[in-house]
Amino acid sequence: MNKHQKPVLTGQRFKTRKRDEKEKFEPTVFRDTLVQGLNEAGDDLEAVAKFLDSTGSRLDYRRYADTLFDILVAGSMLAPGGTRIDDGDKTKMTNHCVFSANEDHETIRNYAQVFNKLIRRYKYLEKAFEDEMKKLLLFLKAFSETEQTKLAMLSGILLGNGTLPATILTSLFTDSLVKEGIAASFAVKLFKAWMAEKDANSVTSSLRKANLDKRLLELFPVNRQSVDHFAKYFTDAGLKELSDFLRVQQSLGTRKELQKELQERLSQECPIKEVVLYVKEEMKRNDLPETAVIGLLWTCIMNAVEWNKKEELVAEQALKHLKQYAPLLAVFSSQGQSELILLQKVQEYCYDNIHFMKAFQKIVVLFYKGVYGCMLFCHCMSLCFVEAL
């Protein structure tokens, strides 16, 4: 035979090759082969994993990834919207899938291992699986409550072991899912399963990396997007860690916005009275304590000027600048704790910026006068003079 000639296949070898090509490129044959293999493996998930491993060399998983994952999760190919394409023909469906599994964490974790093994074996399925899960979350309305629960558990476990990224949760922010309460209900079940695999810090870290930490309120309709509502809903569901996390995140976000606005107003040299009024309104609106505000004020005031590089001149510049804003700081230093925080901020700033070291005592004296002789500043001033001696 000429080396440029292709070998001629005859008989059984030809039929086998044609069958393999048919299984590889026809979606219905792909489905039938997959369903048959799953039914033969039954509830033996080790056998299921081995079947999927070996069959991947014969079936085109890359082309039919959607069908593959639809069947493994729902037992059937899914039409747009989530309805089962083969719902009327049980021979083209399998009960050996996630949706037909027992509704307990250990069982769903075993199914999660099937997905883990499959994706480790065929790495090209990783992105397809992520897309599949995003799609399934969009289809939640088409699934029964128990199917939603199993999918939430599966998602949480796979998020916990790193098979899926937290970005799949963006599908839950779809208007229809949010309005009908499906998004919040699903999220609670998902987070419970996730936190059964990982601790709260790991979960919140993943949310931050995916930029979802500030979007959690969007799981609820607009009229319920409040920290209090979120906190009660998640705390009642046994997820107090997430409630506390959101409160901290919201507080940090509020403080950043307040600091940004304060910086802008101070740079424009707004009248002190206007700044006081603005800060008090923000404190009331966001339930911010005075102790949280005084440090922000100090930082903004010190950032509002370009400081002289010469030590002998910076003290005079600082006193002139702070004298202007001492009344503003006095308004928000009405409590002993606030006064202490302000003193700590002054001390830290002077120690971190060496040119201000000699100005520290003078700043304390200035604030002693500016806050009308409060006892704490009086005591601190006396300590400063003792140290100077």
Image: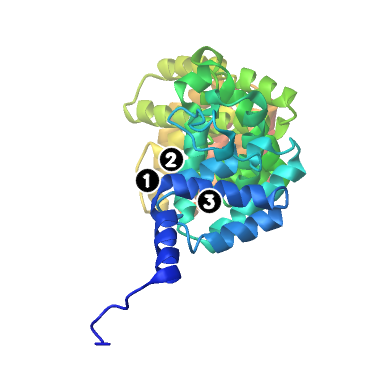
Residue type beneath disc 1: Trp
Residue type beneath disc 3: Thr
- Identify which residue is drawn at 42% across, 27% down: 262
- Identify which residue is drawn at 57% across, 29% down: 251
Circle 1/circle 2 CB separation < 8 Å: yes
Q: Badge 3 is on which residue?
A: 33
49 to the left or right of 238: left
SS for dot 2: helix
- Calculate the distance from the C-alpha at mark 1 to the C-alpha at mark 2: 8 Å
Q: Badge 2 is on which residue?
A: 318
Badge nearest the viewer, 3 or 2: 3
SS for dot 1: loop
Whole-percent x, y for residue 202 in the image: 64, 47
Query: How dense is the environment of label 3, judged by Cα within 10 Å: few (below 14), some, or many (20 and up)?
Result: some
Q: Badge 1 is on which residue?
A: 307
Question: Which quadrant is home to the N terminus?
Answer: bottom left
